[in-house]
Image (cartoon, rainbow, N blue to C red):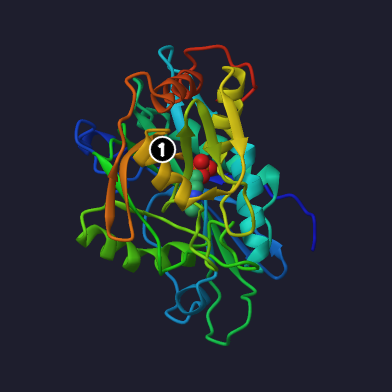
Amino acid sequence: MSTSVKQLRVDKVSKSKISEVNFENLPFGDVFSDHMFICVFKNGEWQEPRIQPYGPLSISPSAKVFHYGQAVFEGMKAYKDDEGQVWLFRPEENLKRINKSSKRLAIPEFPESYFFDGLTTLLQLDKEWVKPGIGNSLYVRPFVIASEAGIKATPAEEYTFMIICSPAQSYYGGEVRVQIAEHYSRAADGGFGYTKAAGNYAGQFYPTQLAQEEGYQQVIWTDAQSHEYIEEAGTMNVFVRLGNTLVTCPTSDRILDGVTRKSVIALAEAHGIKVEVRPIKVSELVAGAKSGVLKEIFGSGTAAVINPILGFGYKGERYELNVPEKSYAGLLKEELINIQYNRSEDKFGWRYPIA
Ligand SMILES: *Cc1c(COP(=O)(O)O)cnc(C)c1O
C-alpha cells in the first residue's frame, strides 16, 4: 500500500442548520450536525480525506455492503465543559477498535493521522452542536462500508470511511429489565462477536423483539454452547454486584471490549471496590437474587454510560433486585461523568481536548 499523505480538504456549509434544531427534545440519533467526514479507499490506498456538508451519498445498488454486510462502526461522545472546551473520552481506543473490527471483516485499516485530523477538524467546525451541561453531548459515529459496486461474494476493493455526528441528551432508558437468553445466541467461538460489525446488531433485533413482547427491554446474551454463562447485553457490557464485589466476565472473541467497561473496572479498583473478572453463571444470579447477595446488575457503554438493570427473567421466572440506595452503578457513573465533563481530575489521562 502506498503511504503518500494527503491533505484534508474542507468544504463548509454556507449556512448552519443549527437554529432549526430543538435541543430540548432530541430523540437519540435522529438529527445530525452540519458536516461529515468522508474518505474513500480505492486503487489500494485511502484517497484524499474530506469534510463536507452532511447529506446523502450516491451509491450503487450492487455495492457489497448491501449484500454481504461488510460494515463496521464505532460510537463515542464529545462533551463540553463549563468553559466551552470540547473533550473526547479515550478516542484512541475507538480507532484501535474500528481497525480491529475492520481487520476481521477484511476491510483495510484506517490511518491514525487521517482519523484524528478528520475527527478534530470536524468537531471544531461543529462545536456549537456540542451543548454544555451534564447529559448533553455530541454522539460521534465513525463507520466503514464496502462501497464497491458488484455482487461477487468477495471482499470489496473499494470502501468508504465516514464520521457523522448527532447531538444527544442524557439518555435515560427508563426502567430496564432483561431477559437472559436461553435459545438464541449473539456470537460464537471463532466468530466476530468482539467487533462492532453491523451484522452483530441485525442478528439481535428479532430475539430482542421477542423479549420485548414479554415485557423486557433487552436481552443478556449467554454463551452459545451451554447458555449457562452470561456474556453481554445489546450494546453494553454487563457488571453484577455480588455482596460488595463487582464482577464482570472476561472479554473474548465473542465479547466486545468496551471502553466504558475497562474505565469502570479502573475506577472501581481506584475506589477500593473489589473487582473480579471471571465467567459468571446464570445460576449465580438466580441464587443471588433469591438470597439477596445479588445487589446490582448494570450495563456499561458509551450511549448510556451506566444503565442500572432492575430485574431479569430466566426460564419463565422473573427476579427483581433490591438495589441499595448507594449503588455502585450510581457512584461509578458520577465519577465517570465528572471526568468526561472536566469536573474532576483526570488521573488516568482519559480526556482528549479538541483545540
Ligand atoms: C459498543 C458496545 C459495547 C460498549 O462499548 P463502549 O466502548 O463502552 O461504548 C458493549 N457491547 C457491545 C456489543 C457494543 O456494541
Quadrant of image for the N terminus: bottom right
Q: Residue furthest front?
A: 291
> Which residue is under mark 1?
298
Q: Residue placed at 74% from the left, 49% from the top?
A: 5
Provide residue 304's location: percent of width, then percent of height: 38, 37
Q: Residue placed at 50% from the left, 39% from the top?
A: 122
Provide residue 103's location: percent of width, then percent of height: 68, 62
Above or below, comparing residue 149 to residue 116 in the picture: below
* In-front residue for pair 91/129: 91
> Would you say 319 lies left or right of 221 here?
left
Q: Please, what secondary structure does the residue beneath circle 1 have?
A: strand
* In-front residue for pair 31/202: 202
On the question of residue 76 being in view, the answer is: no
Provide residue 214's location: percent of width, then percent of height: 21, 59
Q: Residue placed at 80% from the left, 55% from the top?
A: 3
* In-front residue for pair 282/304: 282
Q: Residue placed at 55% from the left, 24% from the top?
A: 268
Can you tell which quarter of the image residue 139 is in?
Answer: top left
